[in-house]
Image (cartoon, rainbow, N blue to C red):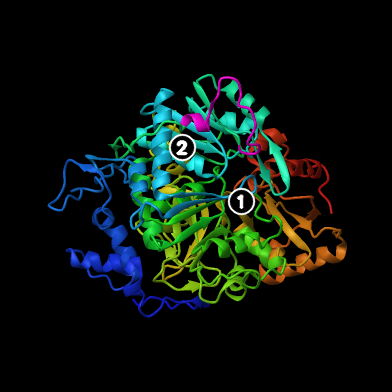
Amino acid sequence: MPTPQVTHEVLWEPAPDARRTTRIGAFMDWVADHGGPSLADARALHGWSVDDQDAFWRAVWAFFAIPATVTDADDQGVPAVALVPAAPGEPPMPGRTWFPGVALNYAEAMLRMPGRADDDVVVVGRSQSRDDVTWTAAELRDAVARARAGLVRLGVGRGDRVVAYAPNVPETLALLLAAASLGAVFSSCAPEFGTRSVIDRWGQIEPTVMLAVDGYRYGAKAVDRREEVAAIQAALPTLRAVVWLPYLDGEAPPPEGATTWSELVAEPAEPAFDRVPFDHPLYLLFSSGTTGLPKPIIHSHGGITVEHTKSIALELGLGSEDVFFWYSTTGWMMWNLLVSGLLTGSTVVLYDGNLAHPDLGSLWRMADELGVTYFGTSAPYLLQCRKEGLVPKEVADLSRVRGLGSTGAPLPAEGFRWVYDAVAPDVRLGSLSGGTDVCTGFVGANPMLPVYAGEISGACLGVAVAAYDTDGQPVVDELGELVITAPMPSMPLGFWGDDDGARYRAAYFEDFPGVWRHGDWITIRPDGSCTITGRSDATLNRGGVRLGTAEFYTVVEGLDEVTDSLVVHLEDSEGGAGRLMLFVTLTPGLDLDDALRRRIRDALRRQLSPRHVPDVIHQVPGVPRTLSGKKLEVPVKKILRGADVDDAASRGALQNPETLTAYEALREHPTP
C-alpha cells in the first residue's frame, strides 16, 4: 500500500551534496563499507538504527573509536555485543544490559577532544558576574587533573557523591569531569534554586563534597547566596568538605573550615581515569520537583558517552571546527548535553546570566563575537524575540551560525518562520524534544532531512518512537501518547534509593507494560515527521476533542496584547466538560476588558474549535514556570481544586514562585 503523501511547508532543505559533506553522511558510507547495509537516506538510517539496535550502536562505537577496555571484542576491538536481548518471556524494558564486559570513563572520552591541539581554546565562560574565562585543551586537562587530585585529598572515591551549587562556569565543568574520572557520582543545582529545593534533592543522595559559590549576578542585580549555602551545609550531615568559589565577590571569605577552589586545584597532577563498568553511575539528574520530592535519576558513564556522541556528532552535526552554545543553567539537562560537545572536539560556550540583559539582543551579539556555529536556546526565548520585533541578523553578524536549536516547549510554525526571516534564511533550525529522564532527545532534527514549519523532522537515531492510543495501539496522523518501544542506552539505571525498582517501573512502564510512556502528546505523520503538543497529563479534552496545550498557547500568545498564558481544564466530577480556565499576562499597562476577552475567544473559536473557547479568562501577574522554563499546568490545576500552594508546587524549584498566590485567590472567584 503506498505511503500517504504529506504536504509540508518546507523552510530549509539539505544541500544536494549533504551525503558527502555531513558527518551523518560519512557515517552512513562507513557503515556500508564495513559490512553494514547500504542506506539510501536518513529515514532508512533511522529504520536500521531501531530494527537492528545491536549493529547500530556497535557501529557508533567503532566509528567514533570510543576509548575503553573490552573483554569480548571482535577483530577490530569493537565490543562483540551492544545490547543483550531480553530472555524469552521477558518484556523488552526495563532491565536491558548494554555493552557487557566494557569498562570506560566519560571524562576520558571527553578530554580526548578529537581534532583539537593543546593550545586550542575549547571552553569559553561568559558571565555577568566576572570577566570571560577561556581554557585551552591543555588548560582544561590540567584543571581536571588538579581538581581530581584535590578530591582525592578530600577523601573522595568511587561511588561517593560530589555536588555543585554553582552556575554554568568552567569550574563546574572541571568538577564534573574530576569526579567522573574517579568514578564518583556528580550532581548539580543552579544557585537560583531555593534552599528547600536543594535539600529535597541532595538529602536523598548523601553527598560528601559540595562546591558552592557566594552568589551571582543576574543582569544588573547581585544575588548573595551565602546564607543559602550555610543552610544547605547544615542540612546535609554527610558533607565532609565544602569547596568555596568566590564568584560574585572575588574577595568573599570562605565559610569556616571550607577549602577554596584555588586550594583544591593548587597541586599539579597528571590526568588519570578510572575505567568503570558501562552502567556505572556518572551523574544524578532530578525531575522538576514541582510536586513532591524530585526523583534522582541515575545516568551511566556508558549510556551518556555513546548517546551524546551520537546525538552531537550525527544529529547536531558538530565537530572540532564548531563553537557550541546552548543557553542553560546547571539545573537543566541541556547543560549536560552542552558540555558533552567536548566529546566531538567542539568548543563549548558556558553562559551565566540574564539572557535579556541589557536587552534580548545580547545573546545574538555574543554569538557574533565568539563565532558560535550552533546556537541553542528555548522556544519561549525565540517567541519573545519575535514578539518584541527583534531582528537578530540586524544586530549581529550571524553568518557563522549553521544550526539553531530550540527546546523546552513546542515551537509553533510562526516561530519557525520568524527564524528564517529574522535570523538567517539558510540556518538549519532543529526543534528538539526529549527529557531529563534520558538526558537527550527522542525526536529532533537531522542534517539530511528538511525543516518543516511547526514540525519536528523525525525520531532521533536509535529511538523507537511511537504514538499510542488509549488501548495501547500505535496510531499515525492522530494524537497519541509518546512512547518508546525499545531500549535506549541512556535510559536511567533507575532512581537513587529505589533499590527494588518499583518507583522507576511505576514512573514509565505502568501504563503500557514493557513500553516507556513519557507523558507527552505526539502526532506522527506517515513520513515520520511529528509534532509535540504538550503534556498528556494537561490535556484539554472537551466533548471528546483532545488538544495539547501548546496549540492553545500558539493562538492566545499570537495576540499582541498577550505576553504569556496558561490554560487549565477542570473536569467535573461526572466526567462532563467542566470549566476551561485561561490565565493571561498582558503587556505592561494593559488591563483585561470585555473587548479583549471577546478577541481571545473569537481567535480560539476560529483557529482551534468552538469546544475549546474558555469558560473564564483571568488576568494574572505572571505564569509560574520551573527553572528550566516549563509552565506549571498540573500544579495550578491542583491549586484551583483546593490544594495548598506548598503541597501543589515546590516554590524553590520555580523561577517566579510569587505568581502562585494569584491562582490561589482565583479558585474562590470562578468569574467572569
Indicate whether residue 249 is drawn in magenta: yes
Residue at the spot 48% in from the left edge and 58% down from the top edge: 324
Taking the spot 81% from the left edge, 63% from the top edge, the residue there is: 597
Residue 108, horizontal then vertical, whole percent: 33, 43
Question: Mark 2 or mark 1: which comes first in sequence?
Answer: 2
Q: Is residue 287 left or right of residue 361?
A: left
| Figure quadrant of residue 421 | bottom right
Camera-side residue of 618 and 356 = 356
Q: Quadrant of the C terminus?
A: bottom right
Q: Which range of residues does the magenta coloring cover?
A: 247-264
Q: Identify residue type, mark 1.
A: Ala
Q: Which mark identifies residue 246?
A: none
Residue 411: give x, y in percent of width and height.
58, 63
Give how far across and how far down residue 659 sits, in percent.
Answer: 75, 44
Specify whether residue 34 is painted magenta.
no
Residue 352 appearing in the image: yes
Q: Which mark is residue 175?
A: 2
Residue at which label 1 appears: 538
State yes or no: discs 2 and 1 in contact (Cβ < 8 Å).
no
Outermost residue toward the left?
A: 75
As drawn, is 28 to the left or to the right of 436? Answer: left
Q: Is residue 160 visible?
A: no
Quarter holding the N terminus is bottom left
As helix, strand or loop, the secondary structure at mark 2 comes to helix
Which residue type does callout 2 highlight? Answer: Leu
In the visual, does 530 lie left or right of 557? left
